[in-house]
Amino acid sequence: MDGLAAVLLVLALWYDLDPRLTNPAVVNQKLPAGQVSPDAVNALPVALWWAASAFMIAAVAVRGRLPLLALAVATAGQVVHLRFTPFLDNAVDLAPALALYTVAAHTGRRAVSIIAAAVAAGAVALALQADPSRVYQVSSPLLRQWPVLLLAAAWVVGEMVRARRLYAEEAQARARDLRQHQEREAESLVAAERTRIAREMHDVVAHGLSVIVIQAQAAAQAMEREPAVARAALDAIVDHGRGALGEMRRLFDLDEAGDREPRDRRAPLPGLADLPDLADRVRAAGLPVTLAIEPAGPVPALVGLSAYRIVQEGLTNTLKHAGPGARAEVSVRCAPSDVQISVADTGGTTAPSSGPGTPGRGLRGMRERVTMFGGELRTGPGPHGGFQVYARLPFEVPP
């Protein structure tokens, strides 16, 4: 674009060129002694004008890469035109305005463009004042300063372009920040969903496998002596396996028909209403369970699911760690603002763990669920022996 502007400036220069600049006869004419021609000029002003014009055109060509230097050179060339040559104004005198526009539009700091505009306008104004013989055919003294006015207009236009560009860049930056924020939120939601699925998978698989292992052991022991007991244990294994698979399908929002089934017809995830079935399955696995739900009122779905998983994990831990002859008592109290859960057994008092000094994944899952609702979790030995889990899940998450 800068090169094209320079070419156009050259074409305009030739279109509006003072004839004295290209007529050697006028420049070098020899008149008799005592005669003076108003068109006669010396060769020096012609050379100065052409040299200054060449530098001004070069300044326009490089103004995009060196805007301040281009402005300085173009302004100096116009000062030479105005101060040291008698020729008419030409299109090449637009070069300082073009250079100042580039400075105002593309210089990063506004103060720099203001100082550059003031210096350029001051230099041109002084050159106009220093040559009172250069009189323009206008009546207004203000319009006689048209080179200065042109510089001011170029700076205003350049400043408007700069402000518009900065606004567009800021809008793009805001859009980019918003997009990155949305991407981070999406990643966070994906990570949270993965954690939720992992927690649900642990609860489903751990409970199902624990019951299956216990029933398989019972079936193996009774296979020859008590075939009916072994058959019942195997039937329980099948029932628990199917139940676990069903919960896994519901967990991934699938059923036997797959994604073709409408969402509102798919089986919901378990809640407080499913606790009696859970207690029956655990009793069938050989652990006596006492269940009390008072009063059995409606609770939010997520709270009901978490309460179910806490009870399920507590009973699973009792199956795995309480030992022979243990019993479990489950109490669920539905208050107007929360659900309070207690799972106690009469087995050992050691907390389940996945390694030396490391809390079990089940207890960590309980704590994560309770923390998600801003509730309370207590685990440890019960007042009469055994191990007890107490959890409180509020319906509304505190701010």
Image: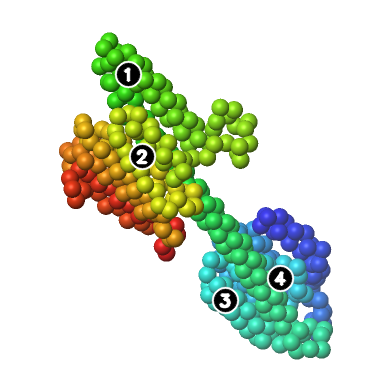
At which x and y percent is residue 202? 36, 36
Amino acid type for the residue under numbered disc 2: Gln
Q: Mark 2 or mark 1: name the one nearer the start of the chain.
A: 1
Image spot of residue 321 (x, y percent): 23, 35
Q: Position of residue 195 (x, y in %)?
A: 40, 42
Q: Image quarter for residue 1?
A: bottom right
Instruction: Measure the C-alpha gap from mark 1 to mark 3.
Output: 97 Å
**Vertical position of residue 222 compared to residue 179: above or below:** above
Residue where numbered disc 4 is placed: 93
- Say what amino acid the circle numbered 1 marks: Val
Q: Nearer the viewer, mark 2 or mark 3?
A: 2
Of callouts 2 and 4, the N-terminal one: 4
Lower sequence index among marks 2 and 3: 3
Q: Are marks 2 and 3 in contact (CB under 8 Å)?
A: no
Between tags 4 and 3, which lies in front? 3
Depth check, front residue: 150 or 204: 204
